[in-house]
Image (spheres, helix red, strand yellow):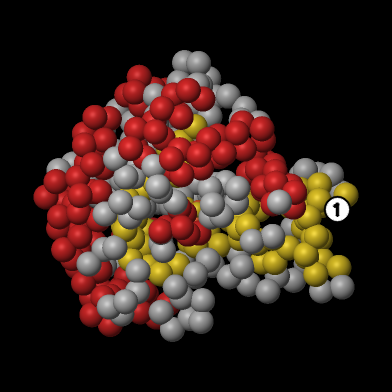
Amino acid sequence: MKDKIDSAKKKAELITNNKIYIPKDIKLPYPLSKSTAGPVSGLLSIALTFANKNIKLVISRDQNERFSLQKEKGKFHILKERKIFLENVNMMPILFHSPGQAFINLDDRCIYSCAFCNLAMQGFLQKYDSEKFVKLILKASNHRDFQAVALTSGVYPENTELIKRMCYIVKKVKEKHPDIPIGVEPCISNKKEIILLKKAGFDEIKINLQIPDKKLFEKICPDFDYDNILNMLKVAVEHFGKGKVTSNIIYGLGESDKTIIESVKKLAKIGVVPTLRKIRINELNKKKLEEATSSGITNVSVDRILRLAHEHKKILDNNSLTTKTFETMCHKCGCCDIVPFWDV
Ligand code: SF4
Ligand code: SF4
């Protein structure tokens, strides 16, 4: 039990720092990853595992970075300020974006402008049509670590087109792999879209609330309707089932713990298992967030991350929910957050 508490604390500390220095002379067993979506999107990252906990960290080129990787006698260790912090850490291969998952971003362009968003907006994925994505997923299915598929996307050129694309890809993949779990992270504006995605073959869905404080939400996600997202989450539970619907809640933008906890309670009450995610600030979103939040960006302490994770777990438990019902996306991957029932 004490070990679990200690390793959760260390994971929270790594989350707050978010970066690791890797000396050039260290030979890594797998290539580094560069995601086009998610909290470390656009940045080179490494996925590590220790004490049954996974973490993805951004690669820093600064030799004086607080955390660094060390290789000694064939084993990896994490150093903090040059002293041993974690021993026997393993690097995980990343299939597509996530260890064990072909988690595919269909478009790195978006017509919306959420201030926290890290989407690289490079249009790099333009050359990938639906057939190419199907081929990529089927190729990934031959990998020995392949366990699941998930689709996400920036909204481009518009949402109806994108939902159709997602449906096409899932149908094609399910023809070959009817039993493989497939998750989807779409923007949803109406009930019909949820029904289409379920009928096409998706098993799990993530509809992100993103910002728990309604007033902050309106500033940070000006293109979206807070109440409609809550309604769509309710509809999603009717079609996908309790424990198969999730939603990102991002914190660290001046909101109170009370606001976060109330929103977790609100979602859990309708059968949604949210992900609580500490905001990652970087050069892609810093300026946009500073402009959108007059209160400024707050530092999130290790204690706050752990306190919220324990509250999160308690609320899920009280509503007979767990993160362990998910076979795809973030609850299963666990690389970016303290995940109740896995990490605490
Ligand atoms: S909808 Fe918002 S969060 Fe999603 S990709 Fe577009 S800008 Fe980013
Ligand atoms: S936790 Fe979610 S966002 Fe982070 S790497 Fe895993 S799947 Fe991607």
Q: Position of residue 230 (x, y in %)?
A: 26, 35
- In the displayed orientation, state which residue is furthest to the top: 294
Locate residue 120 relative to residue 15 in the image: left or right.
left
Amino acid carrying mark 1 in the image? Ile
Is residue 192 toward the left or the right of residue 240 in the image?
left
Q: How many marks?
A: 1
User: 118 or 79, which lies in front?
Assistant: 79
Check disc 1 and report the residue beneath it.
84
Q: Where is residue 311 in the image (x, y as percent from the top left)?
A: 53, 35
Q: Looking at the picture, how far across and down is residue 56, in whole percent? A: 59, 55
Residue at screen point 65% across, 43% down? 12
Q: Residue at x 33, y 37 (%)?
A: 269
Disc 1 beta carbon < 8 A from ligand 2? no
> Residue 234 versus residue 14: which sits nearer the camera?
234
Q: In this view, does 285 lie to the left or right of 196?
A: right
Residue 122, x across and y down, in percent: 40, 51
Q: Is any atom of residue 61 visible in this view?
A: no
Image vertical order of residue 138 relative to residue 281, above or below: below
Residue 178: in sight, yes or no? yes
Local SS, label 1 = strand
Q: Which residue is drawn at 18% across and 41% down?
A: 189
State the residue at coordinates (48%, 81%). Answer: 143
320 to 182, vertically: above or below: above
Alpha-carbon neighbours of circle 1 within 10 Å: few (<14), some, or many (≥20)? Answer: some
Nearer to the camera, 30 or 195: 195
